[in-house]
Amino acid sequence: MKSHKISHRAPKPARSLAKKSAAALGQVVRVLKNPFNGVKPVIGPAPVALKLRAPAAKEVFVAGSFNGWQVGATPLRPAQGGEWQGELKLTPGRYEYLFVVDGSWLPDPAAREAAPNPFGGWNSVLSVN
């Protein structure tokens, strides 16, 4: 009876193809990990709506890290029901801000996050993704 040699290795041409395929797959994986190949996409400003209910207010502004904390730079406009509204165009990032209502600095009661400020109070925090 004739014995047969059993090999668990693929024939040489198949091994070569497998190595080439693995190398190509590795390149594809690297490209997928960094699809921009070192080029960062530029993400433009996104609209962010701000609202504050202040029925007795005569003027309302928002000041924050996005406008250099300048009080008069970003006014809100009066809307129905004593609400004041405004819209910011912000690039992705983390911003601290406060409302300025008739000269008084106030945190946003609707803010989900706050950060201590150097004056012993709290700034509202807005994160744009």
Image (spheres, grey):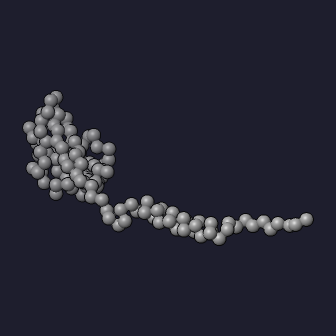
Percent of width and height locating residue 60: 13, 42
Residue pictured at 70% horizontal, 67% vertical: 9
Residue pictured at 9% horizontal, 50% vertical: 72
In the rendered image of this protein, does residue 34 appear above or below residue 48? below
Q: Nearer the viewer, residue 28 or 61?
A: 28
| Residue at the outermost front position | 1
Percent of width and height locating residue 2: 87, 66
Report the quarter where the N terminus lies: bottom right
In the rendered image of this protein, does residue 81 appear above or below residue 26? above
Would residue 69 be found to the left or right of residue 123 on screen?
Answer: left
Q: Nearer the viewer, residue 39 or 66?
A: 39
In the rendered image, which quarter is residue 91 located in? bottom left
| Residue at the outermost right position | 1
| Residue at the outermost top position | 81
In the rendered image, which quarter is residue 57 located in? top left
Residue 120 seen by the camera: no
Q: How many marks?
A: 0
Residue pictured at 16% horizontal, 55% vertical: 67
Percent of width and height locating residue 127: 30, 50
Q: Nearer the viewer, residue 3 or 77?
A: 3
Percent of width and height locating residue 8: 73, 65
Would residue 4 be found to the left or right of residue 11 on screen?
Answer: right
Residue 70 seen by the camera: yes
